Amino acid sequence: MATRYDIPSHIASVTDYEPIARERLPADAFAYISGAAADELTLARNRTAFDALALKSRVLADLRGGGTALSLFGCDFVHPILVAPSGRHRLCDPHGELATLVGAGGAKAGMVVSTEADIRLEELAAAATAPLWFQLYVQHDRAYTLDVVRRAEQAGYRALVVTVDAPVHGLRNRELRAGYRGPKLSEFANLAGLHTTHFAHADLGESLMFGGYLEAVPVWEDIARLRRATKLPLILKGIMAPEDAQRALELGVDGIIVSNHGGRVLDSQPASIEALPAVVREVAGRVPVLMDGGIRRGTDVLKALALGAAAVLVGRPVLYGLAVAGPAGVAHVLHLLRCELEIAMVLTGCRTLSDIGPQVLWQPG
Ligand code: FNR
């Protein structure tokens, strides 16, 4: 008899998980996870831009002794695929992020724990078998925010990922149509006791911005303050503009994640993979640049690394794996991507991650 955590036998690739997750999840939860902002142009473009990049196969290279290991912000990883921060994993599995953590550990993948996780950050850190980074949303209450940072430090998180691209909620029309309602921010396990009236879902009733709301959204000075407040590696997530990357470097950040939040905030942006090269040029090797958005194949990981990413993060596929087969599904999704990356490296003549460069991309003519 199939158990709740069996991996359906016909699954061959990461994208096979999505239709099964759709069948198993309530319609509003699926809309929350799979959806994006407005007309979802950016969501679609995150994929089509990867598909438009072609690879150049190379033959007969001696690849003995190769591998996919890397070191990032003092953490050793056996491959460059991390779990992106996302909230509310209990929608997918009763054990929430604890289940995700087991799956990520099984696949030896790093994981970024969201501020909006359903399990307290301390409990997750205690259960971790691989390095954990903590993703911070700067709250309107800055003293409370600093307290969250202290808790992450004390719990042993190895880096602080500050998400800067979502000062307001994306206009998630698919969620609204499906009747999805998120909790109040203070109902998240990590934000207990926070004084706020804001909800974690798009609400057109709240959508007039230029009143009181903007008085307390994060600004560059908050990054400067965080830089002074913590010795943890500080990584900004949600950078698309080279100008913003430059500003972040001036403030002493240790890393940048090029991301459009999986198309969930501002629609009509280009794909993350389209924004990556200009940010990499601006950063010029001073700090690692990571990226996320649309990674569904090992060849996508290869393409991101070819354009200068040090590593990639994966969002929705991990949640679909979690919804379909709990920790086993998460581990399987990550394992598939890792295997596919290795195959793609072999077929493009790359022995290690540092061999991956623009030469693996097909240049017409
Ligand atoms: C997210 N994302 C996100 N990002 C973040 O910094 N903090 C968060 O709490 C969340 N929450 C969240 C929930 C859900 C359901 C999704 C799908 C995404 C964005 C996430 O970290 C990542 O940027 C994108 O998911 C990457 O795109 P793909 O891999 O989903 O295409």
Image (spheres, helix red, strand yellow):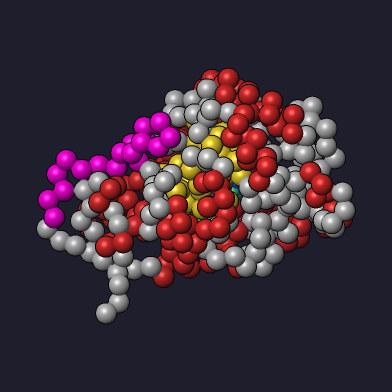
From the top left corner, tell me how far across and down residue 40 is, in percent.
63, 65
Q: Is residue 338 above or below residue 210?
A: above
Query: Which sits in the foreground, 1 or 205?
Result: 205
Range covered by the magenta-colored residues: 61-79
Q: Is residue 117 above or below residue 121?
A: below
Question: Is residue 121 in sight in this rendering?
Answer: no
Side of 143 where 291 appears, left or right: left
Q: Total label count? A: 0
Query: Which sits in the foreground, 187 or 238?
Result: 238
Give the farthest residue toward the bottom: 365
Q: Is residue 102 magenta?
A: no
Residue drawn at (68%, 29%) of the image: 146
From the top left corner, tell me how far across and down residue 148 is, in percent.
67, 28
Residue drawn at (62%, 68%) of the image: 268
Side of 15 where 168 appears, left or right: right
Give the farthest residue toward the front: 250
Question: Is residue 280 in sight in this rendering?
Answer: yes
From the top left corner, tell me how far across and down residue 290 is, in percent.
45, 48
From the top left corner, tell me how far across and down residue 108 is, in percent.
39, 34
The quarter holding residue 243 reads bottom right
Is the stretch drawn in magenta largely helix, strand or loop? loop
Query: Which sits in the foreground, 222 or 334?
Result: 222
Side of 274 where 265 appears, left or right: right
Q: Is residue 62 magenta?
A: yes
Side of 365 where 133 appears, left or right: right
Q: Is residue 66 above or below residue 263?
A: above
